[in-house]
Image: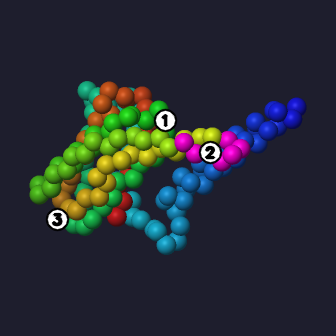
């Protein structure tokens, strides 16, 4: 019975730590960010010919991409933005980092790549997200100011 309890406690601690890390990325009184765009890609029906496409309006300014990936997320996520006076494309690479608390081991995941953009004027942008064939791997993509 003692081993079962230890395993359950480790699972609960891991879930609580992951939830705290995830929520702290988007909360906190000092780092309030305005969410400009968000999509959660967890359904293959969202893709057309393997690529997700959408449009949204954006104001002049500097923005940053944020992601909520996991180990099943696409290993490469190509994001392209196109507008009347703006164009951007980046291949974001998924990286897993092993975390060892001494009690348990788990991975944290992040996408590496050029995540900051500067839009020169207000305009409509078309966003294309290509998961390079992995349409089953869930990931959330945010553009924040």
Placement of the C terminus among the 4 image quadrants: bottom left
Q: x and y percent of residue 34 in the render?
A: 39, 64
Region in magenta: 98-104
Vertical side of 123 occupied by 81: above or below: above
Regarding mark 2 in the picture, which secondary structure is present there? strand
Location of residue 16 in the rendering, given as x and y in whole percent from the top left corner: 66, 49
Above or below, 8 relative to 55: above
Q: Residue at x 54, y 52 (%)?
A: 22
Q: Which label was assigned to residue 71? A: 1
79 or 40: nearer the eye?
79
Nearest to the observer: residue 122 or residue 94: 94
First in residue order: circle 1 vs circle 2? 1
Q: Nearer the viewer, mark 3 or mark 1?
A: 1
Callout in the foreground (3, 2): 2
Residue 34 in view of the camera: yes
At mark 1, the secondary structure is loop
Query: Dot 1, crowdedness within 10 Å: few (<14), some or many (≥20)?
Result: some
Circles 3 and 1, Cβ within 8 Å, touching? The answer is: no
Give me the disc on residue 142: none
Circle 2 residue: 100
Q: Secondary structure at mark 3?
A: loop
Q: CA distance from mark 3 to mark 2?
A: 43 Å
Task: Find the distance from the CA under tag 1 to the CA under tag 2.
Answer: 16 Å
Query: With 137 as the anchor, is 15 left or right in this view?
Result: right
Q: Is residue 10 left or right of residue 124?
A: right
Circle 3 residues within 10 Å: few <14, some 14–19, many ≥20: few
Q: Is residue 103 magenta?
A: yes
């Amino acid at each position: 019975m003692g081993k079962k309890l230890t395993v359950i406690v480790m699972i609960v601690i891991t879930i609580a730590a992951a939830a705290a890390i995830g929520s702290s990325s988007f909360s906190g009184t000092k780092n309030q960010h305005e969410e400009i765009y968000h999509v959660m890609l967890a359904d293959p029906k969202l893709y057309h010919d393997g690529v997700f496409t959408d449009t949204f309006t954006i104001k002049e300014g500097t923005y940053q991409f944020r992601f909520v990936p996991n180990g099943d997320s696409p290993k490469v996520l190509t994001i392209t933005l196109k507008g009347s006076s703006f164009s951007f494309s980046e291949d974001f690479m998924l990286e897993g980092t092993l975390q060892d608390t001494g009690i348990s081991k788990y991975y944290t995941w992040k996408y590496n790549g050029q995540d900051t953009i500067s839009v020169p004027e207000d305009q409509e942008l078309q966003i294309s997200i290509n998961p390079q064939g992995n349409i089953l791997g869930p990931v959330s993509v945010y553009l924040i100011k």
